[in-house]
Image (cartoon, helix red, strand yellow):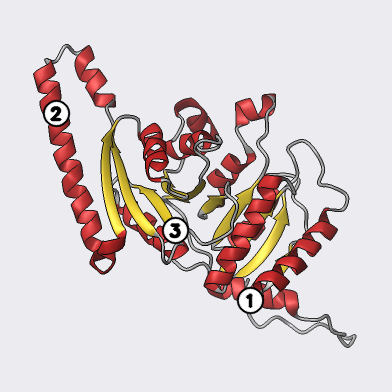
Amino acid sequence: MTPRSILAVTDFSIHGGRALDRAALLSAEHGAVLKLACLAYPGEAPPSDAATRLAHHALQLSQIHRIDVRAVSRLAHAVEDLLPEVSAADLVVCGTAPVRNLRSFFLGQPVEALIRNARRPVLVARRSAKRSYRNMLVAVDFSEASRGLVDMGFSLGKTASVELFHAVSTANEGKLRYAEVSDRAIKAYRDQCRRHAQDRMFWLTDSYDSRRNRVQSALAHGDPARQTLVQQQRNGSELIVVGKHPASTFTDMLFGSVAVRILAYSATDDLRADVLIVPHDWQPASSTSAASRLQAERLPSRRVRAGAPQSPRGPSMI
């Protein structure tokens, strides 16, 4: 999917600045319309000059990259306030300073709430956006959504090299040991899982024959989130692409999805990488609806002659 509309979310921190720069770079690469939005620090009101600062950033990015940039006039006090703008975007680029308080301990970071509710691909910007992505790591689980993850990675990094990665979970091996299964049987089970993973990886990479010289693959054993970060550190990938199954806040907190844990682990200085999280049930924005909405924002107001209103001819289209 090539993004035609991008929403950049900032809190005016250093992290937010990286999100604006990355979103502008992607907008220039894809010819996408860029909108800038402000998300307040949890529990606080947006800065009093937030609208002015957004407008300044929009003008600056427009002049530097020669792209169409507009600031969202409505300031967001919470993630829920952003959802109308999110629904009109094909891609959300987010950069907010980490929240360290009791609220974040129980409810998680604002970006996690955005990922759960957006139903759009969310790119969390962590690196300085000085150039396009040169290499990326796509974590796959061999579901039907995996192919979409690869396509998404190719669309964001048109010239980037791509490595597909899968970590064979060892959780079932622990259950087998608890059931006092012999080490030989456990080893045979692990070998069988690895052969199955190799076959599925071949099935996935075989779908990209035209880009075979740019697609590599790797397998590992262990916790998928941690092994993904180990692989990212090994090959120096600038972007990690990972899918996320639909889940509630409680489920994410109790069990911790692979995507959320990758997001948390990759925030350290040693492993800093951008993370693109793609919900398995994500829905692309309607290009017609988005174009109509953008056109309506540009239309100047006009005077209407007073008189009796005409009867509507049919249902209004939004």
- In the rendered structure, which disc, 1 or 2, sits on the residue that comes first in sequence? 2
User: Is residue 110 shown left or right of residue 194?
Assistant: right
On the question of residue 73 being in view, the answer is no
- Image quadrant assignment for residue 78: top right
Q: How far apart, in angstroms, are the residues tagged by discs 1 and 3?
A: 35 Å
- In the rendered structure, which disc, 1 or 3, sits on the residue that comes first in sequence? 3
Residue in the image at 64% along x and 52% along y: 18
**What amino acid type is highlighted by mark number 2?**
Tyr
Where's residue 97, x and y in %?
68, 40
Residue tagged by mark 2?
189
Assign a secondary structure to mark 1. Answer: helix
Residue tagged by mark 1?
292
Where's residue 170, x and y in %?
27, 27
Q: Quadrant of the N terminus?
A: bottom left
Q: How far apart, in angstroms, are the residues tagged by discs 2 and 3?
A: 37 Å
Assign a secondary structure to mark 3. Answer: loop
**What amino acid type is highlighted by mark number 1?**
Ser
Residue in the image at 70% along x and 60% along y: 36
132 shown above or below 49: below
- In the rendered structure, which disc, 2 or 3, sits on the residue that comes first in sequence? 3
**What amino acid type is highlighted by mark number 3?**
Arg
Query: Mark 1 or mark 3, which is nearer to you?
Result: 3
